[in-house]
């Protein structure tokens, strides 16, 4: 519609017509919903209002297309804007808040494979992350400490001193 308003009244009338058609289709499907009667009435009022007020848009677009002003922008603001704000906006919120559907979302569970290959569980603890680091990488150029860490991990301890960066403290406060 913006392209039509900006460049061509033909594009404007076509796009507004498609928009009106879409609104009427959504309204049709809204009437097919099975809702409790009070909620059904309150949910359908906004769509009926929208169907009525959107006719002003098509009349405005037709006026631009034909050169005969049918509806002016001030009239559109008063009628279309006010009714949509009052009836469409408020009744939509109230209507859908009356009965919120139960969620169908399933809680996330991390999938764990049951495939274990030929792994046999033993009570013997491993000395390191790997038995032989040279099975994975060329260890000739690595310092002995790195090789020792991977093969004899149990002999090492990890110490951490964590401090927040000064620039992050305002964000932490907000959090």
Image (cartoon, helix red, strand yellow):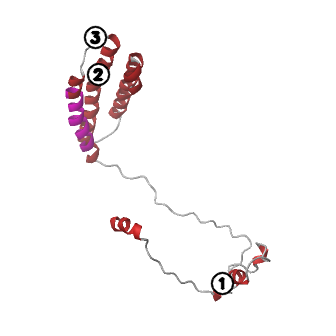
Q: Nearer the viewer, residue 13 or 93?
A: 13
Q: Secondary structure at mark 2?
A: helix
Label 2 vs label 1: CA separation? 76 Å
Label at residue 101? none
Judge the density around disc 1: few (<14), some (14-19), many (≥20) Cα neighbours within 10 Å.
Answer: some
Label at residue 68? 3
Q: Please count the marks in the image.
A: 3
Callout 2–callout 3 Cβ contact below 8 Å: no
Tell me where residue 27 sits by quadrant.
top left
Question: As displayed, is residue 124 above or below residue 87?
Answer: below
**Where is the N terminus found, in terms of image quarters?**
top left
Report the mark closest to the observer, 2 or 1: 1
Range of residues picked out in magenta: 78-94
Badge 3 or badge 1: first in the primary sequence: 3
155 with respect to 9 (left or right): right
Judge the density around disc 3: few (<14), some (14-19), many (≥20) Cα neighbours within 10 Å.
Answer: few
Question: As displayed, is residue 154 above or below residue 89?
Answer: below
Residue occupied by mark 2: 55
Percent coordinates x, y for residue 155 in the rendering: 64, 89
Q: Secondary structure at mark 1?
A: helix
Identified at 24% across, 33% down, the residue is 84
Percent coordinates x, y for residue 76 in the rendering: 24, 25
Percent coordinates x, y for residue 56 in the rendering: 27, 22
Q: Secondary structure at mark 3?
A: loop
Tell me where residue 10 sits by quadrant.
top left
Residue occupied by mark 1: 153
Question: As displayed, is residue 67 above or below residue 14?
Answer: above
Identified at 27% across, 38% down, the residue is 43
Percent coordinates x, y for residue 118 in the rendering: 74, 73
Residue 91 lies in the magenta-colored region: yes
């Amino acid at each position: 519609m913006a392209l039509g308003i900006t460049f061509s009244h033909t594009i404007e009338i076509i796009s507004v017509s498609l928009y009106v058609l879409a609104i009427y289709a959504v309204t049709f499907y809204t009437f097919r919903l099975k809702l409790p009667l009070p909620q059904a009435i309150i949910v359908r009022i906004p769509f009926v209002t929208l169907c009525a007020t959107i006719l002003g848009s098509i009349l405005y677009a037709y006026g631009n297309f034909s050169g005969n002003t049918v509806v002016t922008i001030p009239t559109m603001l008063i009628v279309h804007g006010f009714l949509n704000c009052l009836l469409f906006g408020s009744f939509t919120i109230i209507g859908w808040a009356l009965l919120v559907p139960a969620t169908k979302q399933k809680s996330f569970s991390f999938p764990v494979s049951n495939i274990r290959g030929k792994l046999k569980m033993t009570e013997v603890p491993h000395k390191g992350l790997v038995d032989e680091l040279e099975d994975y990488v060329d260890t000739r150029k690595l310092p002995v400490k790195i090789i020792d860490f991977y093969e004899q991990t149990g002999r090492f301890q990890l110490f951490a001193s964590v401090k927040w960066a000064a620039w992050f403290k305002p964000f932490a406060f907000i959090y």
